[in-house]
Amino acid sequence: MSVRVAPFGRTAGGEPVAAVSFEGGGLRATVLAYGATLARLEAPDRGGRLADVVLGFERLEAYEASPAHVGGVVGRWANRIAGARFVLDGRERRLAANEGANQLHGGPVGFDRRVWQRSALPGGEPGAAFELESADGDQGFPGTLRCRAVYRVEGERTLSLVLEARTDAPTPVGLTQHAYWNLGGAGAGPVLDHELEIAADRYLAVDAQHLLVGGLRDVAGTPFDFRTPKPVGRDLDLAHPDLAPVGGYDHPFALRGGEGPLREVARLAHPPSGRAFALSTTAPSLQLYGGQLLARGPGKAGFAHGPHAGLCLEPQRFPDAPNRPDLGPAILRPGELYRWETRWRFA
């Protein structure tokens, strides 16, 4: 087990960025202070050969230029807030819009576009810890929010991430990790052959702006039924009205168990290599994004990005929950602790 810290350049504003690399339990990972970004994760195939299974870039400038939130921790609110506004305790709050009239992933300068401060882990254990302070009014959100992100190796072939936050005034908080997965590794091609299972009986439809349409819908008999494993691309050609608006999958699934307990909610597998992971989380929802809108361009080790080069499985609170109390909690108040945990256990 080891931890190494190296420079990863400077932002356009001149801030230095560190890269923290660690290994243990059969995994190797690198996390950047920029966005608390999971920049590299090497996992073994059935023959024990390691390959990097997350998309990313070789240079900091590429992370800054990309609109795809590649590998970062996003917040204060993951996903969309319709109209970039919400009402809190009887007062309307206006947010910084960055997707038309709406806000996506916390605004133009969300948490994945900030340099987090590196902090220590006890006992030299393999991992990386970062802290971020978001000031009152940041991207329009009320209250000063103090956040902490801790990546760790937890036992054999298991990576964990814990996100915590406290506030001095009521504010929406809903964070997530935005890795793009390709278990085949660099150069493996599109992820449409990956087999996916999600423990969800219901999902939410979205319109062409990726905003929610109506309430929860049953997955049975639809392309959104992942209750048993199936290839991600199997049903994409079906003429289903909930696939058409966004050209594929970019939808939230209501996970069994609700918010709170850490439980296994999804499995992703790449049959050709034998790589697979089970995803456990405390979040109530899982956003499946098939990567159909990924821009073409160079990634790491000559691996070109493009449509379906990677997919996202984002454990989070429900999109637009600050405006939709029917979808569960959204507000953190002084004296409370927001805590989100996710684990990826590789087979």
Image: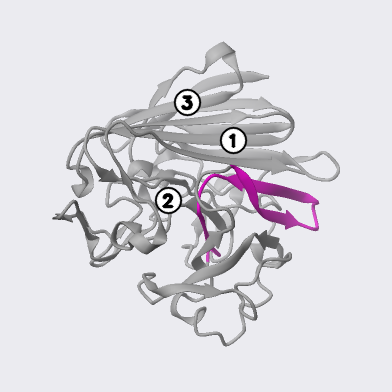
Q: Left or right: where does residue 14 sit relative to residue 263?
A: left
- Look at label 2 and name its amino acid: His
- Look at label 1 and name its amino acid: Ser
**Which residue in the structure is indicated by mark 2?**
69
Residue 185, image x, y percentages: 68, 49
- Asked where in the image residue 163 lies, by quadrant, the reply is top left
The residue depicted at 59 percent of the width and 35 percent of the height is 160
Numbered circle sitting on residue 33: none
- Look at label 3 and name its amino acid: Ala
The residue depicted at 68 percent of the width and 36 percent of the height is 158
Q: Quadrant of the N terminus?
A: top right
Give the vertical position of 58 relative to 234 (above or below).
above
Stretch of the chain drawn in magenta: 262-291
The residue depicted at 64 percent of the width and 60 percent of the height is 198
Give the Cα separation between the discs numbered 3 and 2.
Answer: 19 Å
* Count of marks placed on residues: 3
Q: Earlier in the sequence, mark 3 or mark 2?
A: 2
Whether residue 151 is visible = yes
Residue 137, image x, y percentages: 17, 42
Q: Earlier in the sequence, mark 3 or mark 1?
A: 3
Give the Cα separation between the discs numbered 3 and 1.
Answer: 12 Å
**Local secondary structure at mark 3:** strand
**Which residue in the structure is indicated by mark 1?**
160
**Which residue in the structure is indicated by mark 3?**
129
Q: Residues within 10 Å of mark 3 (few under 14, many from 20)?
A: many
Residue 266 falls inside the magenta stretch? yes
Residue 19 falls inside the magenta stretch? no
